[in-house]
Image (tube, rainbow, N blue to C red):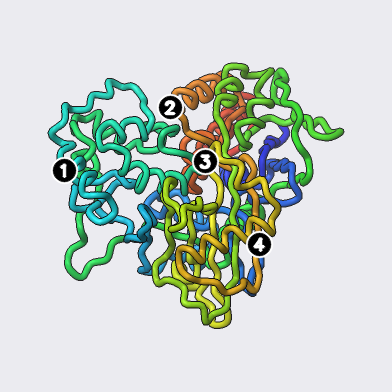
Amino acid sequence: MTEPHVAVVGGGVSGLAAAYRLRKLLGPLATITVIEQTDRVGGKLRTVELGGRSYDVGAEAFLARRREATELITEIGMADDLVHPTSASATVRAAGRINPLPGHTFQGVPASADAVRGVLSDAAVARVAHEPALPPIHLDGEDISVGKLLRERFGPEVTNRLVDPLLGGVYAGHADGLSLRATMAPLAGALDRGAGSLVAAASALVPAPPQQGAKRPPVFGTLRDGLGSLTDRLAKVADATIEYGRPVRRLRRREAGWTVEFGEHALDVDGVVLAVPAPAAAKLLADVAPVAAAAFGGIELASMAVISLVLPADVALPRNSGVLIAGDDRWHDGTRFTAKAFTFSSRKWAHLDGEETLVIRGSVGKAGETAALQVDDDELVRTVLADLAELTGITAAPIDSAVTRWGGGLPQYGVGHLSRVTAIETAVAELPGLAVAGASLHGVGVPACIATSQAAAARVAAHLLGRHRGSGGTMGSWPA
């Protein structure tokens, strides 16, 4: 009995984490081939050299409260590289003012009226205070857009000034188009359990203040040398063959395995993990799992860009970690902002606070808003610098800059997203040796992507190990 051969389509963090987990489960003799259509691995984790330091121009952090990323980083020997943000706090620009981002909220949904005083108008604060007295919320198992529910209960300001900027940073989408159950599952769960109001649901989810002298556990984490170092390490420890510049054009099912066609090649394998964006998954599954393909095809994508700037060290950068910009906010003369947020990286991360230069990044682009991205890089840098000057008064010319465009980079979790995911996973479950992973499923963050990759690897490995056992093989125990 030959040792198993698994193809992983996609060399982002999901694909590489799947390849690593397959190696652990199947052992050193298995063949694992990662097929990546570009000339580099990492996907949305991309670290470049900027201003003499390693700097992330894709995802810059992960949610540390989810265990998957931290545990994987520790498992592959990178725990010493793990760092957390400084104590600098975030802010939001709304109604022409910059205010601290309220702390006593769940993803911007207020747990009390006092929490949002100062960011909202007096009338909006009064609506928040009155919301628990409205008729109880009964979702009855249905999904609804975040914006629709919040506007009905609070009016427009909570959505426009708090929730939309936060969700825009995570999903590059708008609250009015994003699913409550997919993007705010704990809040939906609290309502399902009878919280009755949004304020009550948020209050049940906000952590209690730490005891005197105690510190809250960090919310976010990253790696000292950039998150690209995570995918570089995964590629190494997975001990996989990586095929670069190879777009996969077709997936065919065989009697006892799969054929993956890319370029002039047709690779026969025992199992496949698809860790690619929704449009690619839809194309590859069209013949073998049409229901899953249709569900993937219903997932829309948003494009965005990261504008990275290196500034002289003597620039008076704000002491906070960054600023979110409400979508309906304007310059004082009425000009629209191009940027949706700025991260003052040298304030947020101690390891990026250099003696000679400072680094910041501006984010541009949301779902349905493509005009801001339809300019060349020089113009994008110019408009983002103008926004920075409007927000902070900084007019210094950058020492260096980089524009990184993520075309179709972020899946939109629209209303009914979880039903689409169920349809995908149910259809794929009927095909032995095939699994899917990635940001299109259960979350766009690094930990969520790792979770899907681990589940996908476990599914494929279980099939292969069971098949080899049944044929008299000696593959070893699972899980390993």
Above-or-below relation of 432 to 103: above
Q: Earlier in the sequence, mark 2 or mark 1?
A: 1
Q: Earlier in the sequence, mark 2 or mark 3?
A: 2
Q: Nearer the viewer, mark 2 or mark 3?
A: 2
Name the secondary structure under disc 3.
helix
Above-or-below relation of 30 to 227: above
Q: Earlier in the sequence, mark 4 or mark 3?
A: 4
Q: Amino acid at mark 2?
A: Val
Horizontally, is 152 left or right of 381 in the view?
A: left
Q: CA distance from mark 2 to mark 4?
A: 35 Å
Determine whether label 2 and label 4 are within 8 Å by CB. no
Determine whether label 2 and label 1 are within 8 Å by CB. no
Could you say which disc has been placed on residue 129 in the image? 1
Q: Nearer the viewer, mark 1 or mark 4?
A: 1
Q: Locate residue 243, reporting x and y percent.
A: 77, 44
Q: CA distance from mark 1 to mark 4?
A: 45 Å
Q: CA distance from mark 3 to mark 1?
A: 43 Å
Q: Which residue is mark 3?
A: 454
Q: As rendered, which of 300 and 129 lies closer to the eye?
A: 129
Q: CA distance from mark 2 to mark 3?
A: 26 Å
Q: Locate residue 430, reporting x and y percent.
A: 56, 18
Q: Nearer the viewer, mark 2 or mark 1?
A: 1
Q: Residue at x 40, y 43 (%)?
A: 164
Q: Which residue is mark 2?
A: 415
Q: Which residue is mark 4?
A: 402
